[in-house]
Image (cartoon, rainbow, N blue to C red):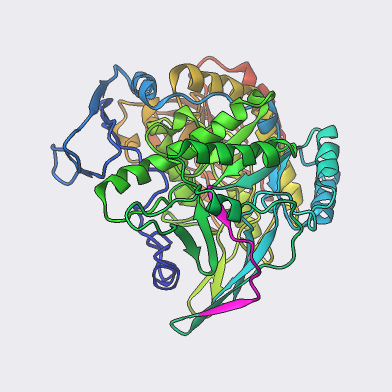
């Protein structure tokens, strides 16, 4: 929701305040940079307020008796990024396999996953990997008449859903397709939930666990051995409760609890041949009234990423592994291998939808998140009669995929409610998805070079226009178009039904990649055709041409134009 109505009101009213506001985020980084490439970076994790309301003055208030800050200046925006990422840490290039094609989200048991993989191969989809989040089982959560598929947070292969998991993964690997899975810092009690029903202001929710076959159940062990977070004063177990889903949270301040959870990841994720995973959550550390809890809350995402990085670095094939993080703290780029920008609604909007994902990917790069992407298609769908209707249409899926082509990872998500929402493997979507995956793959060498710049200089792949055009005042407030590296200007289409788009071209010579039409801009807005499959993308021809872009440009020019 994040301000979109009435969904924000509904979620805040009936789902524990999860609707939020437009300024809510999973990633809190105490960093401020100005258009003059000067900035402030706080080493504090305490509650902090940046007050930008007074013209010409910036006030920063920190709830602490000790404030540790760095003042940063660069001769250019790119030089500034080099300096600030010396503090945040710099992200390393992704393993090559991860961005040679699409990573497609699919779940629902081994038989279904194998059928969908075969369907996508037959359709010519270049598959880098399959992301199967329900490897450990799932349950149904019905809220206000909507039935959601939720992962069961017990980190062991569900042998009932995936009886031949290891053989399936090995077979995929034999065809060049990697398996990615899912984990978070919670453990669920796996006791039977016999269709338990609770009343919430005359609204109902139901969680049904179904049947599962695990070799191990970790919740009770973690509880008995003291690995779950407890209130420091009362000793009560801190639990997360999401409309019938209850779990405990691992205490990452205890070395033995970190070792316990590290052991789970090694025994379950690595031993079962997971080449990567979504490292979800991290932002739920409780605020229990003590000011020290605020700092611990802000540091927990960093500790969660650090633990996952230690597990992967300790593996024999650690450089070939991947995990992606949703939450972040100030030093998370030191540990995270990749970020994604959270669980957007299956919608178009600037508060919580495709447009907001574009903004998040662009702006997060200014705080050291040099490798960032989004759930292609969004995540959350819901229908409440006479109130809200969020469903992913084939058009929304295609436009989101067009955006993902120009990020560092091309990964889809079935969503919390897969049925009734457009999927990449649907008959009416699979051909376009295959084409977009090929376009993404054609940029492999170009992305490789950009990832080297991220490692060496801290420069993000997706770049705010300010980084390359600092003297152009028009670009400062732009968060709907970006540069992929120094050469490609991209303006994703974020309006339903749009067939033409307005895009800003900074001063210089530009070429429309789909038609070859050249524009000599003095710094102006132009309107171009933007039918499905051809979002506004321009090559900066005033620079030395990049040979690593040749494959992409040839493919772009070979695509048919819109029907006359």
**The stretch drawn in magenta includes residue 195:** yes
One can see residue 261 in this view:
yes
Q: Residue at position x 61%, y 25% from top?
A: 314
Q: Residue 120 appears at what percent x and percent y?
A: 80, 47
One can see residue 507 in this view:
no
540 or 145, nearer to the observer:
145
80 or 301, nearer to the observer:
301
- For the record, the magenta segment spans 185-198
Residue 230 located left or right of residue 538: left
544 or 440, nearer to the observer:
440
Q: Quadrant of the N terminus?
A: bottom left
Q: Residue 15 appears at what percent x and percent y?
A: 45, 69
- Report the number of discs: 0
Q: Name the quadrant containing residue 145.
A: bottom right
Residue 236 located left or right of residue 516: left
**The stretch drawn in magenta includes residue 415:** no
Q: Residue at position x 58%, y 37% from top?
A: 262
Q: Is residue 201 above or below residue 485?
A: below
Residue farthest to the front?
Answer: 224
């Amino acid at each position: 929701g994040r301000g979109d109505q009435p969904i924000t009101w509904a979620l805040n009213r009936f789902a524990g305040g999860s609707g939020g506001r437009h300024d809510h985020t999973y990633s809190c980084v105490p960093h401020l940079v100005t258009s003059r490439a000067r900035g402030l970076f706080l080493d504090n994790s305490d509650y902090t307020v940046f007050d930008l309301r007074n013209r010409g003055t910036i006030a920063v208030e920190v709830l602490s008796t000790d404030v540790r800050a760095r003042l940063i200046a660069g001769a250019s925006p790119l030089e500034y990024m080099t300096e600030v990422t010396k503090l945040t840490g710099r992200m390393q290039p992704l393993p090559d396999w991860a961005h040679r094609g699409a990573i497609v989200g699919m779940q629902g048991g081994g038989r279904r996953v194998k059928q969908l993989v075969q369907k996508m191969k037959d359709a010519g989809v270049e598959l880098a990997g399959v992301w199967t989040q329900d490897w450990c089982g799932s349950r149904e959560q019905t809220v206000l008449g909507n039935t959601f598929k939720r992962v069961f947070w017990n980190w062991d292969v569900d042998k009932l859903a995936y009886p031949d998991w290891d053989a399936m993964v090995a077979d995929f690997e034999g065809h060049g397709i990697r398996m990615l899975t899912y984990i978070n810092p919670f453990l669920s009690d796996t006791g039977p939930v016999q269709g338990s029903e609770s009343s919430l202001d005359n609204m109902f929710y139901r969680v049904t666990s179904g049947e599962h076959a695990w070799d191990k159940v970790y919740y009770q062990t973690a509880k008995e051995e003291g690995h779950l977070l407890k209130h420091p004063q009362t000793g009560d177990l801190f639990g997360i409760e999401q409309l019938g889903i209850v779990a405990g949270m691992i205490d990452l301040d205890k070395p033995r609890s970190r070792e316990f959870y590290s052991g789970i990841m090694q025994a379950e994720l690595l031993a079962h041949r997971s080449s990567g995973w979504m490292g979800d959550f991290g932002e739920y550390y409780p605020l229990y009234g003590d000011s020290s809890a605020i700092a611990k809350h802000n540091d927990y995402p960093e500790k969660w990423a650090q633990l996952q990085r230690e597990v992967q670095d300790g593996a024999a094939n650690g450089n070939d592994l991947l995990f992606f993080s949703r939450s972040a703290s100030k030093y998370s780029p030191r540990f995270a291998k990749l970020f994604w920008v959270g669980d957007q609604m299956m919608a178009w909007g600037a508060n919580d939808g495709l447009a907001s994902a574009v903004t998040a990917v662009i702006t997060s790069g200014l705080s050291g998140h040099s490798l960032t992407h989004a759930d292609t298609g969004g995540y959350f769908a819901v229908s409440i009669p006479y109130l809200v209707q969020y469903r992913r249409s084939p058009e929304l899926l295609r436009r989101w995929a067009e955006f993902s082509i120009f990020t560092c990872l091309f990964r889809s998500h079935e969503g919390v409610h897969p049925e009734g929402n457009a999927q990449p493997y649907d008959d009416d979507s699979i051909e376009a998805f295959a084409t977009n995956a090929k376009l993404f793959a054609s940029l492999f060498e170009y992305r490789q070079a950009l990832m080297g710049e991220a490692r060496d200089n801290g420069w993000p792949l997706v770049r705010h226009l300010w980084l390359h055009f600092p003297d152009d005042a028009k670009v400062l407030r732009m968060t709907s178009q970006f540069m992929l590296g120094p050469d490609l200007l991209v303006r994703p289409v974020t309006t339903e039904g749009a067939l033409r788009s307005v895009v800003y071209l900074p001063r210089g010579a530009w070429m429309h990649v789909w038609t070859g039409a050249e524009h000599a801009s003095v710094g102006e807005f132009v309107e171009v055709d933007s039918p499905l499959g051809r979002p506004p993308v321009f090559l900066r021809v005033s620079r030395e041409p990049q040979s690593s872009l040749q494959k992409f440009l040839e493919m772009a020019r070979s695509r048919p134009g819109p029907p006359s």
